Image (spheres, rainbow, N blue to C red):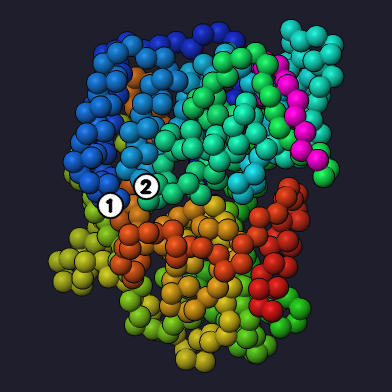
Amino acid sequence: MSRFSVILIISITFLVTSASRIPISGQLKDFEVFKKVLIEKEGRLDLHTSLDSITFYLNRLEKQLAYDCTPLEEFKHFSTALAKIQCGHTQIHPTKAVLKEWLSARKSLLFDYIVQGKKLYTNKLLAQDTPLISLGKSKFEQKKKLKAFTEIISIDHKSMPQMMSEIAPFLSSDENGIDFKYFQVAQLFEFYRHMSSPFKEDSILVEYVSGPDTLEKYFQTGTAPVNSMKLRLKQMSDQYALYEKNMGAFKIVRSKIGYFRFHSFKSSYGKDYELFLEKSFKRIKSKGIKKLIIDVRGNTGGAMQYSIMRYFVGGDVVLGRYVVEKPKRLFEDSHIKKLNSDFFKHRRMSRIQKRKNRRQLFKNGEIKTSHVSEDLIYKGEIIVITDEGSFSSASILASHLKTLANAKIVGRRAGGSFYRGNAGTLRVQLPSSKLKMFVNPNTFYSHLSMPSNTLIIKGPDLELSPGFIKSSKMDDYYLKGALKAFE
Protein backbone atom coordinates (compact mmCIF):
# COMPACT_ATOMS: atom_id res chain seq x y z
CA MET A 1 0.00 0.00 0.00
CA SER A 2 2.65 2.45 -1.07
CA ARG A 3 0.02 5.03 -2.02
CA PHE A 4 0.10 6.46 1.52
CA SER A 5 2.83 8.91 0.50
CA VAL A 6 4.35 7.79 -2.78
CA ILE A 7 1.33 9.10 -4.67
CA LEU A 8 2.63 12.60 -3.97
CA ILE A 9 6.05 12.27 -5.61
CA ILE A 10 5.09 13.92 -8.87
CA SER A 11 3.34 16.71 -6.98
CA ILE A 12 6.26 17.66 -4.69
CA THR A 13 7.61 20.61 -6.66
CA PHE A 14 8.68 24.08 -5.63
CA LEU A 15 5.66 26.24 -6.46
CA VAL A 16 5.42 29.87 -5.39
CA THR A 17 2.19 31.08 -7.02
CA SER A 18 -1.08 31.03 -5.14
CA ALA A 19 -3.10 27.83 -5.38
CA SER A 20 -6.29 28.28 -7.43
CA ARG A 21 -9.61 27.90 -5.64
CA ILE A 22 -12.74 26.21 -6.86
CA PRO A 23 -16.19 27.81 -6.46
CA ILE A 24 -18.47 26.82 -3.60
CA SER A 25 -20.70 25.00 -6.10
CA GLY A 26 -17.69 22.84 -6.98
CA GLN A 27 -16.97 22.14 -3.31
CA LEU A 28 -20.55 20.99 -2.81
CA LYS A 29 -20.39 18.82 -5.94
CA ASP A 30 -17.31 17.16 -4.43
CA PHE A 31 -19.29 16.59 -1.25
CA GLU A 32 -22.17 14.94 -3.11
CA VAL A 33 -19.81 12.47 -4.78
CA PHE A 34 -17.88 11.91 -1.53
CA LYS A 35 -21.06 11.06 0.40
CA LYS A 36 -22.63 8.96 -2.35
CA VAL A 37 -19.54 6.81 -2.91
CA LEU A 38 -19.01 6.25 0.80
CA ILE A 39 -22.58 5.08 1.33
CA GLU A 40 -22.65 2.91 -1.79
CA LYS A 41 -19.16 1.36 -1.68
CA GLU A 42 -17.62 1.49 1.83
CA GLY A 43 -17.99 -2.02 3.27
CA ARG A 44 -19.18 -1.20 6.81
CA LEU A 45 -19.45 2.51 7.64
CA ASP A 46 -20.42 1.57 11.20
CA LEU A 47 -17.56 -0.87 11.78
CA HIS A 48 -15.96 1.36 14.43
CA THR A 49 -18.30 4.38 14.53
CA SER A 50 -22.10 4.53 14.80
CA LEU A 51 -24.14 5.51 11.75
CA ASP A 52 -25.60 8.41 13.74
CA SER A 53 -22.09 9.75 14.28
CA ILE A 54 -21.19 9.31 10.63
CA THR A 55 -24.34 11.20 9.63
CA PHE A 56 -23.39 14.01 12.02
CA TYR A 57 -19.87 14.29 10.55
CA LEU A 58 -21.21 14.29 6.98
CA ASN A 59 -23.73 17.02 7.80
CA ARG A 60 -20.97 19.08 9.39
CA LEU A 61 -18.77 18.58 6.34
CA GLU A 62 -21.53 19.82 4.04
CA LYS A 63 -21.91 22.98 6.13
CA GLN A 64 -18.14 23.58 6.09
CA LEU A 65 -18.02 23.29 2.31
CA ALA A 66 -20.85 25.79 1.92
CA TYR A 67 -18.22 28.48 2.61
CA ASP A 68 -15.35 29.46 0.33
CA CYS A 69 -12.30 27.26 1.06
CA THR A 70 -8.70 27.23 -0.10
CA PRO A 71 -7.52 23.87 -1.54
CA LEU A 72 -5.76 23.06 1.74
CA GLU A 73 -8.83 23.95 3.79
CA GLU A 74 -11.05 21.77 1.61
CA PHE A 75 -8.60 18.88 1.96
CA LYS A 76 -8.55 19.31 5.74
CA HIS A 77 -12.37 19.18 5.90
CA PHE A 78 -12.57 16.02 3.79
CA SER A 79 -9.71 14.25 5.57
CA THR A 80 -11.16 15.05 9.00
CA ALA A 81 -14.55 13.63 8.06
CA LEU A 82 -13.05 10.52 6.48
CA ALA A 83 -10.86 9.82 9.52
CA LYS A 84 -14.02 9.51 11.62
CA ILE A 85 -14.82 6.20 9.88
CA GLN A 86 -11.70 4.80 11.58
CA CYS A 87 -10.63 2.61 8.67
CA GLY A 88 -6.96 2.90 7.73
CA HIS A 89 -7.64 1.77 4.18
CA THR A 90 -10.21 4.51 3.57
CA GLN A 91 -8.20 7.62 2.78
CA ILE A 92 -7.98 10.84 0.81
CA HIS A 93 -4.80 12.36 -0.64
CA PRO A 94 -3.80 15.93 -1.50
CA THR A 95 -3.46 17.31 -5.00
CA LYS A 96 -0.85 19.61 -6.53
CA ALA A 97 -3.05 22.57 -5.58
CA VAL A 98 -3.03 21.52 -1.91
CA LEU A 99 0.74 21.04 -1.88
CA LYS A 100 1.23 24.30 -3.76
CA GLU A 101 -0.58 26.15 -0.99
CA TRP A 102 1.69 24.58 1.63
CA LEU A 103 4.93 25.23 -0.24
CA SER A 104 4.08 28.76 -1.34
CA ALA A 105 3.53 29.75 2.29
CA ARG A 106 7.34 29.43 2.80
CA LYS A 107 6.77 28.54 6.44
CA SER A 108 8.93 25.42 6.75
CA LEU A 109 12.16 24.78 8.60
CA LEU A 110 15.28 24.10 6.52
CA PHE A 111 15.26 20.37 7.36
CA ASP A 112 14.05 17.33 5.51
CA TYR A 113 12.55 14.91 8.00
CA ILE A 114 12.48 11.16 8.43
CA VAL A 115 10.17 9.46 10.94
CA GLN A 116 11.34 6.08 12.18
CA GLY A 117 8.94 4.41 14.56
CA LYS A 118 7.81 7.31 16.71
CA LYS A 119 10.96 9.41 16.51
CA LEU A 120 11.80 12.33 14.24
CA TYR A 121 15.19 12.73 12.54
CA THR A 122 16.79 15.11 10.08
CA ASN A 123 17.70 13.74 6.65
CA LYS A 124 20.60 14.46 4.33
CA LEU A 125 20.12 17.57 2.19
CA LEU A 126 21.06 17.77 -1.48
CA ALA A 127 23.38 20.58 -2.56
CA GLN A 128 20.76 21.97 -4.95
CA ASP A 129 18.50 22.72 -1.98
CA THR A 130 21.03 25.14 -0.43
CA PRO A 131 19.99 28.15 -2.56
CA LEU A 132 16.31 27.46 -1.81
CA ILE A 133 16.56 27.19 1.97
CA SER A 134 19.07 30.07 2.15
CA LEU A 135 16.83 32.48 0.26
CA GLY A 136 16.42 35.75 2.18
CA LYS A 137 18.53 34.63 5.16
CA SER A 138 21.59 36.32 6.62
CA LYS A 139 25.00 34.61 6.51
CA PHE A 140 24.63 33.93 10.23
CA GLU A 141 21.34 32.09 9.68
CA GLN A 142 22.70 30.24 6.65
CA LYS A 143 25.44 28.71 8.82
CA LYS A 144 22.91 27.19 11.23
CA LYS A 145 22.61 23.50 10.45
CA LEU A 146 21.88 20.16 12.04
CA LYS A 147 23.79 17.04 11.04
CA ALA A 148 21.93 14.41 9.07
CA PHE A 149 20.05 11.88 11.22
CA THR A 150 19.95 14.13 14.28
CA GLU A 151 17.00 13.29 16.51
CA ILE A 152 14.62 16.21 17.01
CA ILE A 153 12.91 16.20 20.40
CA SER A 154 10.56 19.15 19.91
CA ILE A 155 9.64 21.88 17.42
CA ASP A 156 8.10 25.16 18.53
CA HIS A 157 7.83 23.85 22.12
CA LYS A 158 5.87 20.77 20.97
CA SER A 159 7.14 17.22 21.44
CA MET A 160 6.66 14.54 18.81
CA PRO A 161 3.60 13.10 20.63
CA GLN A 162 2.13 16.59 20.93
CA MET A 163 2.63 17.29 17.22
CA MET A 164 1.11 13.92 16.35
CA SER A 165 -1.94 14.62 18.50
CA GLU A 166 -2.54 17.71 16.32
CA ILE A 167 -1.91 15.79 13.09
CA ALA A 168 -3.95 12.70 14.04
CA PRO A 169 -7.45 14.07 13.27
CA PHE A 170 -6.54 14.35 9.57
CA LEU A 171 -5.40 10.72 9.15
CA SER A 172 -7.41 7.50 8.89
CA SER A 173 -6.48 4.44 10.91
CA ASP A 174 -8.17 1.29 12.17
CA GLU A 175 -10.01 1.92 15.46
CA ASN A 176 -8.52 5.44 15.40
CA GLY A 177 -5.18 4.03 16.61
CA ILE A 178 -2.25 6.47 16.68
CA ASP A 179 0.41 3.94 15.65
CA PHE A 180 -0.53 3.69 11.97
CA LYS A 181 -0.72 7.49 11.81
CA TYR A 182 2.96 7.69 12.71
CA PHE A 183 3.65 5.38 9.77
CA GLN A 184 1.63 7.52 7.39
CA VAL A 185 3.45 10.77 8.22
CA ALA A 186 6.88 9.15 8.04
CA GLN A 187 7.70 10.51 4.58
CA LEU A 188 5.61 13.72 4.62
CA PHE A 189 5.90 14.92 8.17
CA GLU A 190 6.43 18.62 7.39
CA PHE A 191 3.30 18.76 5.20
CA TYR A 192 1.08 17.34 7.93
CA ARG A 193 2.75 19.44 10.63
CA HIS A 194 2.10 22.60 8.61
CA MET A 195 -1.48 21.57 7.84
CA SER A 196 -2.31 20.90 11.49
CA SER A 197 -0.45 23.80 13.10
CA PRO A 198 1.31 26.29 10.78
CA PHE A 199 4.10 28.35 12.30
CA LYS A 200 3.01 31.78 13.52
CA GLU A 201 6.52 33.11 14.12
CA ASP A 202 9.43 33.56 11.71
CA SER A 203 11.95 32.03 14.13
CA ILE A 204 11.22 28.61 15.64
CA LEU A 205 12.86 26.89 18.61
CA VAL A 206 14.11 23.37 17.86
CA GLU A 207 15.19 20.97 20.61
CA TYR A 208 17.52 18.21 19.43
CA VAL A 209 19.99 15.56 20.56
CA SER A 210 23.73 16.03 20.10
CA GLY A 211 25.76 13.17 21.52
CA PRO A 212 24.77 12.80 25.19
CA ASP A 213 23.28 16.29 25.31
CA THR A 214 19.90 17.81 24.51
CA LEU A 215 20.35 21.25 22.95
CA GLU A 216 18.13 24.08 21.71
CA LYS A 217 18.51 26.45 18.76
CA TYR A 218 16.29 28.91 16.92
CA PHE A 219 15.90 28.51 13.15
CA GLN A 220 14.21 30.86 10.72
CA THR A 221 11.41 29.53 8.53
CA GLY A 222 11.45 29.60 4.75
CA THR A 223 11.31 27.32 1.73
CA ALA A 224 11.12 23.55 2.21
CA PRO A 225 14.04 21.50 0.79
CA VAL A 226 11.90 20.02 -1.98
CA ASN A 227 14.69 18.41 -4.01
CA SER A 228 15.78 16.30 -1.05
CA MET A 229 12.17 15.38 -0.41
CA LYS A 230 11.57 14.34 -4.00
CA LEU A 231 14.68 12.13 -4.07
CA ARG A 232 13.77 10.45 -0.79
CA LEU A 233 10.20 9.76 -1.93
CA LYS A 234 11.42 8.43 -5.28
CA GLN A 235 13.84 6.04 -3.58
CA MET A 236 11.13 4.82 -1.24
CA SER A 237 8.72 4.35 -4.13
CA ASP A 238 11.22 2.28 -6.09
CA GLN A 239 12.00 0.16 -3.04
CA TYR A 240 8.36 -0.48 -2.28
CA ALA A 241 7.65 -1.43 -5.90
CA LEU A 242 10.26 -4.16 -5.52
CA TYR A 243 8.74 -5.29 -2.23
CA GLU A 244 5.30 -5.63 -3.82
CA LYS A 245 6.69 -8.00 -6.46
CA ASN A 246 8.34 -10.22 -3.84
CA MET A 247 6.07 -12.87 -2.31
CA GLY A 248 8.41 -13.31 0.67
CA ALA A 249 11.70 -14.89 1.67
CA PHE A 250 12.75 -17.69 4.01
CA LYS A 251 16.14 -18.58 5.45
CA ILE A 252 17.66 -20.43 8.37
CA VAL A 253 19.82 -18.39 10.74
CA ARG A 254 22.32 -19.72 13.28
CA SER A 255 21.75 -23.18 11.78
CA LYS A 256 18.61 -23.77 13.83
CA ILE A 257 16.18 -20.85 13.62
CA GLY A 258 13.78 -20.22 10.74
CA TYR A 259 13.17 -16.65 9.50
CA PHE A 260 10.40 -15.45 7.19
CA ARG A 261 10.62 -11.86 5.92
CA PHE A 262 7.47 -10.44 4.37
CA HIS A 263 7.82 -6.81 3.25
CA SER A 264 4.41 -6.97 1.53
CA PHE A 265 1.63 -9.46 0.91
CA LYS A 266 0.70 -7.89 -2.44
CA SER A 267 2.07 -10.90 -4.39
CA SER A 268 1.72 -13.51 -1.63
CA TYR A 269 -0.97 -15.70 -3.20
CA GLY A 270 -1.45 -18.22 -6.02
CA LYS A 271 0.33 -21.39 -7.07
CA ASP A 272 3.86 -19.99 -6.83
CA TYR A 273 3.23 -18.74 -3.31
CA GLU A 274 1.71 -22.05 -2.23
CA LEU A 275 4.80 -23.80 -3.57
CA PHE A 276 7.03 -21.35 -1.67
CA LEU A 277 5.19 -22.09 1.57
CA GLU A 278 5.30 -25.85 1.06
CA LYS A 279 9.03 -25.82 0.29
CA SER A 280 9.75 -23.60 3.29
CA PHE A 281 7.85 -25.79 5.76
CA LYS A 282 9.37 -28.95 4.32
CA ARG A 283 12.75 -27.39 4.96
CA ILE A 284 11.68 -26.44 8.49
CA LYS A 285 10.65 -30.07 9.04
CA SER A 286 13.81 -31.60 7.56
CA LYS A 287 16.12 -29.31 9.55
CA GLY A 288 14.26 -29.91 12.81
CA ILE A 289 13.57 -26.20 13.31
CA LYS A 290 11.96 -25.49 16.70
CA LYS A 291 12.17 -21.69 16.67
CA LEU A 292 10.60 -19.53 13.96
CA ILE A 293 10.57 -15.76 13.34
CA ILE A 294 8.01 -14.07 11.08
CA ASP A 295 8.91 -10.44 10.30
CA VAL A 296 6.07 -8.23 9.00
CA ARG A 297 7.48 -4.77 9.81
CA GLY A 298 6.34 -2.15 7.31
CA ASN A 299 4.03 -4.68 5.65
CA THR A 300 0.85 -2.75 4.85
CA GLY A 301 -0.93 -5.84 3.58
CA GLY A 302 -2.18 -7.32 0.36
CA ALA A 303 -3.61 -10.83 0.11
CA MET A 304 -5.07 -12.22 3.33
CA GLN A 305 -2.76 -14.87 4.77
CA TYR A 306 -5.21 -17.66 5.50
CA SER A 307 -3.10 -20.23 3.64
CA ILE A 308 0.03 -19.97 5.79
CA MET A 309 -2.00 -20.46 8.98
CA ARG A 310 -2.76 -24.09 8.12
CA TYR A 311 0.93 -24.84 8.68
CA PHE A 312 0.48 -23.75 12.30
CA VAL A 313 -3.03 -24.91 13.23
CA GLY A 314 -3.87 -27.62 10.69
CA GLY A 315 -6.97 -27.84 8.54
CA ASP A 316 -10.62 -26.94 9.20
CA VAL A 317 -9.87 -24.22 11.80
CA VAL A 318 -12.05 -21.08 11.72
CA LEU A 319 -9.97 -17.93 11.07
CA GLY A 320 -12.82 -15.44 10.80
CA ARG A 321 -14.91 -14.04 7.94
CA TYR A 322 -14.33 -12.13 4.69
CA VAL A 323 -17.35 -10.49 3.04
CA VAL A 324 -17.86 -8.29 0.00
CA GLU A 325 -20.30 -6.05 1.86
CA LYS A 326 -20.88 -3.77 -1.14
CA PRO A 327 -20.70 -6.03 -4.26
CA LYS A 328 -20.30 -4.62 -7.73
CA ARG A 329 -23.47 -3.03 -9.03
CA LEU A 330 -24.71 -3.01 -12.61
CA PHE A 331 -24.04 0.72 -12.83
CA GLU A 332 -21.29 2.09 -10.59
CA ASP A 333 -20.67 5.75 -9.85
CA SER A 334 -18.84 7.33 -12.78
CA HIS A 335 -16.19 8.81 -10.45
CA ILE A 336 -14.94 5.34 -9.44
CA LYS A 337 -11.91 4.41 -11.53
CA LYS A 338 -12.67 1.13 -13.27
CA LEU A 339 -9.80 0.34 -15.66
CA ASN A 340 -7.43 -1.03 -13.04
CA SER A 341 -6.63 -4.31 -11.29
CA ASP A 342 -8.34 -3.28 -8.04
CA PHE A 343 -11.71 -2.78 -9.72
CA PHE A 344 -11.32 -5.97 -11.78
CA LYS A 345 -10.65 -7.86 -8.55
CA HIS A 346 -13.74 -6.30 -6.97
CA ARG A 347 -15.85 -7.45 -9.91
CA ARG A 348 -14.40 -10.98 -9.75
CA MET A 349 -14.87 -11.32 -5.97
CA SER A 350 -18.45 -10.05 -6.25
CA ARG A 351 -19.23 -12.75 -8.82
CA ILE A 352 -17.61 -15.48 -6.72
CA GLN A 353 -19.56 -14.44 -3.63
CA LYS A 354 -22.82 -14.31 -5.59
CA ARG A 355 -22.18 -17.79 -6.98
CA LYS A 356 -21.41 -19.19 -3.50
CA ASN A 357 -24.58 -17.64 -2.14
CA ARG A 358 -26.66 -19.31 -4.87
CA ARG A 359 -25.11 -22.66 -3.96
CA GLN A 360 -25.52 -21.97 -0.23
CA LEU A 361 -21.76 -22.29 0.25
CA PHE A 362 -20.95 -18.75 1.35
CA LYS A 363 -21.87 -19.17 5.06
CA ASN A 364 -21.61 -15.42 5.71
CA GLY A 365 -18.01 -15.41 4.51
CA GLU A 366 -16.66 -17.87 7.07
CA ILE A 367 -13.01 -18.74 6.45
CA LYS A 368 -11.48 -22.05 7.51
CA THR A 369 -7.97 -23.37 6.96
CA SER A 370 -7.60 -25.91 4.18
CA HIS A 371 -6.05 -29.35 4.53
CA VAL A 372 -2.29 -29.74 5.07
CA SER A 373 -0.10 -32.77 5.70
CA GLU A 374 0.19 -33.43 9.44
CA ASP A 375 3.96 -33.80 9.03
CA LEU A 376 4.30 -30.16 7.97
CA ILE A 377 2.37 -28.58 10.86
CA TYR A 378 4.86 -26.52 12.88
CA LYS A 379 4.66 -26.94 16.67
CA GLY A 380 7.67 -24.95 17.89
CA GLU A 381 8.15 -21.43 19.27
CA ILE A 382 7.10 -18.44 17.15
CA ILE A 383 8.02 -14.78 17.29
CA VAL A 384 6.27 -12.17 15.13
CA ILE A 385 8.03 -8.84 14.56
CA THR A 386 5.61 -5.94 14.08
CA ASP A 387 5.74 -2.15 13.93
CA GLU A 388 3.52 0.82 13.06
CA GLY A 389 3.46 -0.23 9.40
CA SER A 390 2.19 -3.77 10.06
CA PHE A 391 -1.32 -3.34 8.74
CA SER A 392 -4.35 -5.11 7.23
CA SER A 393 -3.52 -8.72 6.30
CA ALA A 394 -0.16 -8.39 8.12
CA SER A 395 -1.78 -7.37 11.41
CA ILE A 396 -4.47 -10.06 11.05
CA LEU A 397 -1.73 -12.66 10.51
CA ALA A 398 -0.05 -11.43 13.71
CA SER A 399 -3.42 -11.74 15.46
CA HIS A 400 -3.89 -15.30 14.26
CA LEU A 401 -0.37 -16.34 15.22
CA LYS A 402 -0.61 -14.78 18.68
CA THR A 403 -3.99 -16.20 19.59
CA LEU A 404 -4.03 -19.52 17.72
CA ALA A 405 -0.32 -20.49 17.70
CA ASN A 406 0.86 -18.89 20.96
CA ALA A 407 3.32 -16.56 19.20
CA LYS A 408 5.15 -13.77 21.00
CA ILE A 409 5.31 -10.27 19.55
CA VAL A 410 8.59 -8.34 19.31
CA GLY A 411 9.12 -4.79 18.07
CA ARG A 412 6.35 -2.22 18.44
CA ARG A 413 2.58 -2.25 18.38
CA ALA A 414 1.13 -3.07 14.95
CA GLY A 415 -0.61 -0.25 13.10
CA GLY A 416 -3.51 -2.40 11.88
CA SER A 417 -6.42 -4.00 13.69
CA PHE A 418 -6.21 -7.49 15.19
CA TYR A 419 -10.00 -7.74 14.93
CA ARG A 420 -11.62 -6.33 11.80
CA GLY A 421 -11.49 -3.73 9.05
CA ASN A 422 -12.65 -2.67 5.59
CA ALA A 423 -10.49 -3.53 2.57
CA GLY A 424 -10.55 -4.08 -1.20
CA THR A 425 -9.52 -0.59 -2.23
CA LEU A 426 -11.33 1.22 -5.04
CA ARG A 427 -10.05 4.53 -6.42
CA VAL A 428 -12.24 7.62 -6.65
CA GLN A 429 -11.52 11.13 -7.92
CA LEU A 430 -13.65 14.02 -6.70
CA PRO A 431 -14.83 15.99 -9.75
CA SER A 432 -13.97 19.60 -8.86
CA SER A 433 -10.92 19.47 -6.58
CA LYS A 434 -9.54 16.25 -8.17
CA LEU A 435 -8.76 14.93 -4.68
CA LYS A 436 -7.98 11.21 -4.79
CA MET A 437 -10.08 9.10 -2.44
CA PHE A 438 -9.99 5.38 -1.62
CA VAL A 439 -13.05 3.40 -0.51
CA ASN A 440 -13.21 -0.24 0.53
CA PRO A 441 -16.20 -2.47 -0.30
CA ASN A 442 -15.03 -5.57 1.61
CA THR A 443 -15.01 -6.25 5.34
CA PHE A 444 -12.77 -8.78 7.09
CA TYR A 445 -13.12 -10.16 10.60
CA SER A 446 -10.69 -12.23 12.63
CA HIS A 447 -11.95 -15.07 14.82
CA LEU A 448 -11.88 -12.76 17.86
CA SER A 449 -14.71 -10.79 19.43
CA MET A 450 -14.18 -7.03 19.77
CA PRO A 451 -13.13 -5.99 23.30
CA SER A 452 -13.52 -2.54 24.87
CA ASN A 453 -9.76 -1.95 24.50
CA THR A 454 -8.40 -3.10 21.13
CA LEU A 455 -4.79 -2.04 21.84
CA ILE A 456 -3.90 -4.43 24.66
CA ILE A 457 -3.63 -7.50 22.43
CA LYS A 458 -1.08 -5.77 20.15
CA GLY A 459 1.35 -4.86 22.94
CA PRO A 460 4.78 -6.42 22.27
CA ASP A 461 6.25 -8.97 24.66
CA LEU A 462 9.60 -7.29 23.93
CA GLU A 463 9.54 -3.68 22.76
CA LEU A 464 12.31 -2.40 20.47
CA SER A 465 12.56 1.39 19.99
CA PRO A 466 16.05 2.09 18.63
CA GLY A 467 17.66 5.34 17.56
CA PHE A 468 18.15 6.03 13.88
CA ILE A 469 19.10 2.97 11.82
CA LYS A 470 20.06 2.91 8.14
CA SER A 471 17.54 0.92 6.12
CA SER A 472 20.24 -1.55 5.03
CA LYS A 473 20.88 -2.51 8.66
CA MET A 474 17.33 -2.50 9.98
CA ASP A 475 16.46 -6.15 9.31
CA ASP A 476 19.58 -7.28 11.15
CA TYR A 477 18.74 -5.13 14.18
CA TYR A 478 15.24 -6.55 14.57
CA LEU A 479 16.37 -10.08 13.83
CA LYS A 480 18.92 -9.85 16.65
CA GLY A 481 16.20 -8.52 18.94
CA ALA A 482 13.93 -11.44 18.10
CA LEU A 483 16.72 -13.93 18.69
CA LYS A 484 17.27 -12.47 22.17
CA ALA A 485 13.56 -12.85 22.86
CA PHE A 486 13.90 -16.63 22.47
CA GLU A 487 16.46 -16.60 25.26
> Residue 271 in magenta?
no
Mark 2: few/some/many CA within 10 Å (<14, 14-19, 20+)? many
Mark 1: few/some/many CA within 10 Å (<14, 14-19, 20+)? some
Mark 1: amino acid: Leu
Disc 2 marks which residue? 87
Disc 1 marks which residue? 47
Image location of residue 122, percent across then percent down: 72, 35
Q: In the shown orientation, is residue 342 left or right of residue 353?
A: right
* Visible residue check, residue 428: no
The quadrant of the rendering that contains the C terminus is: bottom right
Image location of residue 313, percent across then percent down: 44, 82
Residues at discs 1 and 2 in contact (Cβ within 8 Å): yes
Camera-side residue of 359 and 100: 100
Q: In the shown orientation, is residue 285 left or right of residue 19?
A: right
Specify the segment rendered in magenta.
Answer: 213-226
Residue in the image at 33% along x and 40% along y: 84
Image location of residue 341, percent across then percent down: 41, 47
Q: In the shown orientation, is residue 261 left or right of residue 361?
A: right
Above or below residue 381? Residue 304 is: above
Above or below residue 39? Residue 192 is: above
Label 1: element kind: loop
Q: In the shown orientation, is residue 169 left or right of residue 221?
A: left
Instruction: State the mark number for residue 366.
Output: none
